[in-house]
Amino acid sequence: MSYCVYCTAKSGSHATQIANHLRLSGFAPGDISLLAPDRSSGRELGVQTNSKAPEGAAAGAGTGAVLGGAMGWLVGIGSLAIPGVGPFIAAGPILAALSGVALGGAVGGVTGAMVGWGIPEFEAQQFEGRLREGHILISVHAEDGAEAARAREILADEHAENITTGSEASLSGAR
């Protein structure tokens, strides 16, 4: 069974530190996702996806520049607007998963998507609240329980917040 380990980081530099530690510890770039509020503009964005970091960094100044510039190794980076939540910069498999929410105008935004991924509703609401406060959501795909435990240990070592693990069974279409 596959798992997904989630956490939040307080800033772009904190998220960069966490993601780089995960990568250096053997997690593949395609297994690491980030979702950050895009505070660079007050306007609503449509979905814009890119597979190259320089173009992705241009999708949003501010947080997008941090995600794209400092972590050009991430798989895909883009911007999207989640109804009721606002504009975001996303990278990794989470971008594809949330693009459907943004395009479809799904009710529930990030919370609804995360509940669909196996995260309990209470925790999903906490994650969405942290995103609204400006924190960055990080998720890591893990093939088995041992790999999930290793990811949790790295996140704890890096002082990540709100660390939780969910089953990834319902994420197979998003990967």
Image (cartoon, rainbow, N blue to C red):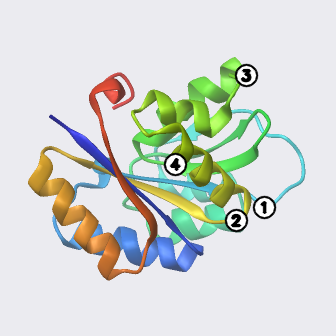
Q: Where is residue 43 in the image (x, y as percent from the top left)?
A: 89, 46
User: What's under tag 2, amino acid-wise?
Assistant: Gly
10 Å neighbourhood of mark 2: few (<14), some, or many (≥20)? some
| Mark 4 and mark 2: Cα distance apart in space | 17 Å
User: Is residue 37 at all visible to an observer of this figure?
Assistant: no
The image shows residue 66, relative to residue 86, as above or below, that is below
User: What's under tag 1, amino acid-wise?
Assistant: Arg
10 Å neighbourhood of mark 1: few (<14), some, or many (≥20)? some
Which label sits in the foreground, 4 or 3?
4
Q: Which quadrant, please, contains the N terminus?
A: top left
10 Å neighbourhood of mark 3: few (<14), some, or many (≥20)? some
Q: Earlier in the sequence, mark 1 or mark 3?
A: 1
User: What's under tag 4, amino acid-wise?
Assistant: Glu
Residue lying at the far front of the rendered structure? 122
Foreground pick, 131 / 27: 131
Q: Position of residue 39 (x, y in %)?
A: 78, 61
Is 43 displayed left or right of 130 in the figure? right
Q: Which of marks 4 and 3 is nearer the N terminus?
A: 3
Q: Do the residues labelled 1 and 2 touch (CB within 8 Å)?
A: yes
The image shows residue 26, relative to residue 156, as above or below, that is above
Residue lying at the far top of the rendered structure? 104
| Mark 1 and mark 2: Cα distance apart in space | 8 Å
Helix, strand or loop at mark 2:
loop
Which label sits in the foreground, 1 or 3?
3
Q: Where is residue 161 in the image (x, y as percent from the top left)?
A: 47, 70
Residue at screen point 66% across, 34% down: 109
